[in-house]
Amino acid sequence: MNTTTVKGSWNEQKGKLKKQFAVLTDNDLMFEEGKKDEMLGKLQIKLGKTKDEWTKILASL
């Protein structure tokens, strides 16, 4: 899978997350390679969900 495919897929997933959780911003969902855990940590704090809950949410998109 190339970088363009991953970015396109992530942009789609971001849109779905923003619909599901209206308080999320593009900044909250900024994904940088190698910093997935950092992003998940910020989301956990902002919405009060555990890492396991976020993993399930992202897998369901």
Image (cartoon, helix red, strand yellow):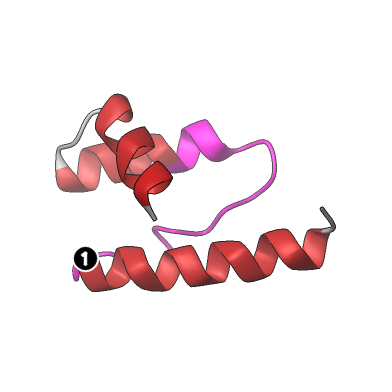
Left or right side of 61 for 18? left
Could you tell me residue 36's position as x and y percent?
Answer: 55, 38
Residue occupying image coordinates x 31% and y 45%? 57
Q: Is residue 26 visible?
A: no
Which residue is more in the foreground, 39 or 2?
A: 2
Q: Is residue 23 magenta?
A: yes
Could you tell me residue 20's position as x and y percent?
Answer: 21, 65
Main SS of the magenta part reads loop
Q: Is residue 50 magenta?
A: no
Task: Give the amino acid at mark 1.
Answer: Gln
- Res 24 quadrant in image: bottom left
- Res 42 quadrant in image: top left
Which residue is more in the foreground, 21 or 56?
A: 56
Q: Which stretch did the figure color magenta?
A: 22-39
Q: Residues within 10 Å of mark 1 (few under 14, many from 20)?
A: few
Residue located beneath label 1 in the image: 20
Find numbered disc 1 in the image and state the secondary structure of the residue it sits on: helix
